[in-house]
Each structure stands twice: as C-alpha cells, then as structure tokens.
Amino acid sequence: MKGRSRKQMKANTAIQSKPLAVLGAPPRFQSVLHVGRPNVGSRERLLARLNDMLDRRWFSNDGPFVKEFEAKVASIAQTRHCVAMCNATVALEIAVRALEMTGEVIVPSYTFIATAHALQWQEITPVFADIDPATSTVDPRSIERMISSKTSGILGVHLWGRACDTEAIEKIGREYGLKVMYDAAHALACSHQGRMVGGFGECEIFSFHATKFINAFEGGAIVTNNDDLATRLRFMRNFGFSGYDKVSYLGVNGKMTEACAAMGLTSLESLDEIVQVNKANYEAYESRLAGIPGVSLIRYDKQESNNYQYIVVEVDPAVAPLNRDELVAVFHAENVLARKYFWPGCHRMEPYRSLQPNADLLLPNTERVASRTCLLPTGQAVDAGMIESIAEILNAAFQSAGEVKDALRRRSGGHGD
Ligand code: T4K
C-alpha cells in the first residue's frame, strides 16, 4: 500500500496474540502508533515543487503555490474566496478581528484549546456553551442561554468533521444580531445537508496542521463568500499592507509559505486516496468493535461527504468493564497512543479554569462526553492488521478487567488512576 513501507507494516503488525503489556507482557506493537501520524503523499511531486520554488526564489508573500492552493481549497469548499494562513489558530484570530468581534463570544468548551485561545488572546471572553451529547457539537439551546449584553458573536466548531446545527445557530445569530463563524479545522471536504462545509456563517477556518488528513506541514485557511471580508483578511494577514509602503489596516504576519503550500498542494492531490484509506479504517474499526459492551464508535452520516479522519470511541463506564482512562492506559502500554481529545474541556484548562471557576455547572454534557471519549490511530500509517490487533487488545483488557484494574492501581501506588 502507498505511503507506508512493507517492512514497517510487518514490524508493526501483532507480534503476539493474548497477554497484555499492562500485565507484564512485551508491548503488542514494537513501534509507537500515533493518533495524527502525518499522511505523506507523493515525495516526488513534493520535491519537484520544492525545486521549482528554489529556482523561482519566491518563498512567501502570496506566491504562486499559495495562490494555487487557495484556488483548490476554495473549489473543495465551494466558496468564492480562500485566504491561506500560516496555521488555523492565527487564521481564527485574524477572522475574529476582521469580523470585529468584541466583549464575549460563545464557543463550545468541547474543542481544541486553540478555539478558545483565539478569542482570549484578543481579550475577548470565550463564553462556554454545552454540547448536544448526541452529536458532540455545540447545542444551540445552550448558546441561547449564554447570550448577554456583551455577546458579539458565535464561534461554532464542526467537531470531528461533523457539522454543527448551522441552521439553528444562524437563526440565533440573526435574531440577536450576532456574527457567526465556524472553526472547521476538522471538516475539509465534509458536507452538511448536501452543502460543502466552507460557505456557512460569515467564514469558516480549516487547519492543515501535520496531523490533519490533508496537511501543509503547518497551515490554515479562511474560506468565505463575503468579498469585503476576504479583502480585509488578505490585508490583515500581511501586516495590513494594501500596496507598497501603504498600510490600511491593523495587521499581523499570518502568511503561508511557499514550502507549506507545496506540501498542501501535494497532499490535496492524494485527497481521494487518503479518504478511502480513512473510510476503510473506519469500517474495519466499526466491524471489529461491534458488540463490545459499552464501546461505541461515533457515526458519520453516509448521506454526506466525510473525510473519516478521526476514529472517536465512547466508553460508557456504566456498561464497559474498564473506563476510558483505564483503557487508554492499557493502549499506551501496548504502544498505541490513544488520545483523550478534548478532555477535560477548555473550561477546565488555564486560564479559563481560574477565570471562570464555575463554568462546569453549565456544561454537564461536555463533562460527561469528555470523560468517556478517546481517539484511536488511523490514516495512511494504519492498516487492517493493526486495527485487528487494537481490537484484540481491547477485548483482552475487558476479559481481564479485574487484573488490569489491580495492575493499574499498583502502578499508580494505589491511587487507582
Ligand atoms: N481548532 C480545532 C478544532 C483543532 O482541532 C485545531 C488543531 C485547531 C483549531 C488549531 O489548528 P492549528 O493551529 O494547529 O492549525 C494536535 C495538533 O497539533 C492540532 O493541530 C490539532 N488541532 C489537535 C487536535 O491535535 P496535540 O498537541 O494534541 O498533538 P501533537 O501536535 O503533539 O500531535 C499528535 C501526535 O501526532 C503526536 O503524538 C505525534 C504525532 N505527530 C505529530 C506531528 C506534529 C507525528 O507523528 N508527526 C508530526 O509531525 O495537537
């Protein structure tokens, strides 16, 4: 299979079938399996592009690769504009500023910390709304409850690529005169009710970080159908310059480099192939995890376009013999670095924990979902054999749950975590 060497695959396939590393056996995988191992794409195409870049001696500042990358992303998102940025965090910050959000902005707590930081960094208070436990995306009813006289906007997040309830959110936006934008870091090439993610709200932001299914080493992009906003965003990402020696806006340096755009273009050429691998991995997990008590895989709506880039598993502690934290400890011992995204929720991380110490009282679903979710490895670095082994580890751990709990308790000096 493209993108991984046979030797590496073989070394990483199950080396034994039963005993668990947490109980003293050697780890099931010899090398570590990560959540978010980058997909590489065609080395030849990337190196050819980098050579072109060197020959051209044009390395940054709206170069030809950046322009081509923007055109391709706008075409996937079906938007009039795409403004590429150095990463999605800076893109969020620039978008928030270009939309003149101030005071308070409502955002889910159940997201990567960058969503909240993009606001707080500009001294805008992120007011945390709860999620709908059925979808893990922000609950419009909770948004409405959080509106105050200081609220200027709503920043929704299309978590795991599944779009939030854009109709309800935008209705609230219209009723209360609030700007609406979306963090679509996970949602490139995903659709919502048949429309591609990209054209919802005032603008949407994609991430092309190394760990995303399409990567530009580091990168981000803002897509929008608003011509004036796109113009402002272009100025703002380049110090506010609107011409030689002419500064028209407050700006910053948010530019994407040509090397990053070269990687982004190369990665985009493999989009279909990567989605196919992700989908096959998702289906392999779906069949291997089916029927295991208390373990469920989040669902992607088959009527929509999905990138299937995350394998998100919920562990119900009332049913499963081990809880999420115990299971993650079991996986780590086997060199499967399952992640607890986005535990414990932004509201329990600094500076928000200190600034808003009682936020948890209004976020019961966030607290519950964050305590039971873990992500498993996928992408081009993972194959069906590895998924089979991961499922075997899970089954073996559940079968020996008593021993596993004892071993974990001993390891933590009797504190049980
Ligand atoms: N909004 C949302 C909803 C997001 O999820 C993110 C980013 C953003 C906004 C901000 O986007 P950017 O500003 O980053 O464009 C990772 C990523 O760094 C982050 O981009 C991503 N979300 C988040 C979900 O995951 P970490 O700190 O948990 O993991 P990290 O970067 O250490 O990487 C995870 C694993 O991947 C590592 O254990 C090893 C492996 N890895 C990582 C890199 C960078 C590799 O094998 N190779 C690599 O090059 O945040």
Image (spheres, rainbow, N blue to C red):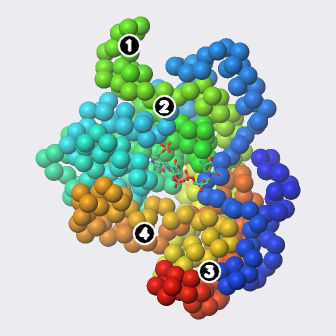
Dot in front, 4 or 2: 2
Do labels 4 and 1 touch, CB within 8 Å?
no
Marks 4 and 2, how far apart in space? 32 Å
Dot in front, 3 or 1: 1
* Residue found farthest to the top: 244
Q: Which mark is residue 369?
A: 4
Marks 4 and 1, how far apart in space? 46 Å
Marks 1 and 2, how far apart in space? 17 Å
Q: Is residue 404 visible?
A: yes
- Quarter of the view holding residue 383: bottom right
Q: Earlier in the sequence, mark 3 or mark 1?
A: 1
Label 2, on which residue? 85
Do labels 3 and 1 touch, CB within 8 Å?
no
Label 1, on which residue? 242
Q: Earlier in the sequence, mark 4 or mark 1?
A: 1
Q: Which residue: 35% across, 47% down? A: 117
The percent coordinates of residue 298 (x first, y second) are 54, 65
Numbered disc total:
4
Q: Say which element carries label 2.
A: strand
Dot in front, 4 or 1: 1
Q: Say which element carries label 3.
A: loop
Do labels 3 and 4 touch, CB within 8 Å?
no
* Residue found farthest to the front: 413
Q: Is residue 216 left or right of residue 79?
A: right
Q: Earlier in the sequence, mark 1 or mark 2?
A: 2
Q: Earlier in the sequence, mark 3 or mark 4?
A: 3
Label 3, on which residue? 292
In the depicted structure, whether residue 242 falls above or below residue 164? above
The disc labelled 4 sits on which kind of residue? Answer: Val
